Image (tube, grey):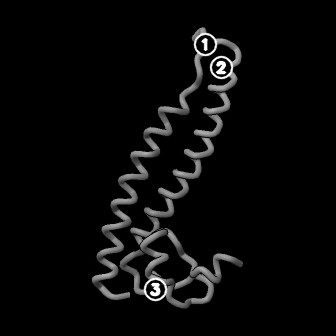
Amino acid sequence: MTPSARKELKIKIEQAIASTEEKVKSLEEITQPISPENSIGRVSRMDAINNKSVAEASLRSTRQKLSKLKVALSRIDNENFGNCTFCKNPIQPARLMYMPESSRCVRCADR
C-alpha cells in the first residue's frame, strides 16, 4: 500500500469512527427503557418495545463496527496492514475504502 493511499485511508477511517460514534449516541438514546408510567396504550407500548429491540440490535452491530474501525486505525501503520489475514495477499484498495475495517480479501471473506 502506498503512503498516500495509507494516508487517505487513515482519514477515511477517522471520519468513519466519528460518524459511527454519533450513530452509537443516537441509538443509545433510542434504546432507553420504556417507562410503564407513560399512558401510550397497550398496542403502542408493544410497538415501542419492538422498535426498542430492533434499535438494540442495531446498536450492538454499530458498536462492533466501531470497535473494528478503532482496531484498523491502530494497525494502519503496520507494514502488513492491507494484506488478508488468511491468504496474505493484498486486499483490494476499493474494498478497504468501502470497508476500512476489513481484514480479509473478498475471496477469503466468502469462505
CA separation in Å, label 2 and label 3: 51 Å
Q: Tell whether 24 sits left or right of 60.
A: left
Question: Upstream in the sequence, badge 1 or badge 2?
Answer: 1
Distance from disc 1 to disc 3, alpha carbons, whole Å, reads 55 Å
Question: Foreground residue, 15 or 81?
Answer: 15
Q: Are marks 1 and 2 in contact (CB under 8 Å)?
A: yes
The residue mark sitting in front, 1 or 3, is: 1
Residue 26, given in percent of the width and then of the height, sits at 44, 38
Three-letter amino acid code of the residue under disc 1: Ile
- Residue at numbered disc 2: 45
Residue 109: x and y in percent read 64, 76
Residue 17 place in picture, x, y as percent: 39, 57
Q: Secondary structure under badge 3? A: loop
Type of amino acid under label 2: Arg
Q: Position of residue 102 (x, y in %)?
A: 52, 72
Taking the spot 47% from the left edge, 32% from the top edge, the residue there is 29
The answer to which quarter of the image holds residue 13 is: bottom left
Q: Residues within 10 Å of mark 2 (few under 14, many from 20)?
A: some
Report the residue marked by disc 3: 80
Which residue is located at x 44 percent, y 46 percent? 23
Cβ atoms under marks 2 and 3 closer than 8 Å: no
Q: Which residue is mark 1?
A: 40
Asked if 48 appears above or below 104 in the picture, the reply is: above
Label 1: element kind: loop
Residue in view at x 55 percent, y 56 percent: 64
Please report the residue visible at 36 percent of the width from the left and 78 percent of the height from the top. Answer: 77
Amino acid identity at mark 3: Asn
Q: Badge 3: few (under 14), some or many (20 or more) residues near its Cα, within 10 Å?
A: some
Image quadrant where one finds the C terminus: bottom right
- Which numbered tag is attached to residue 28? none
In this view, the mark in front (2 or 3): 2
Above or below, 38 against 48 in this view is above
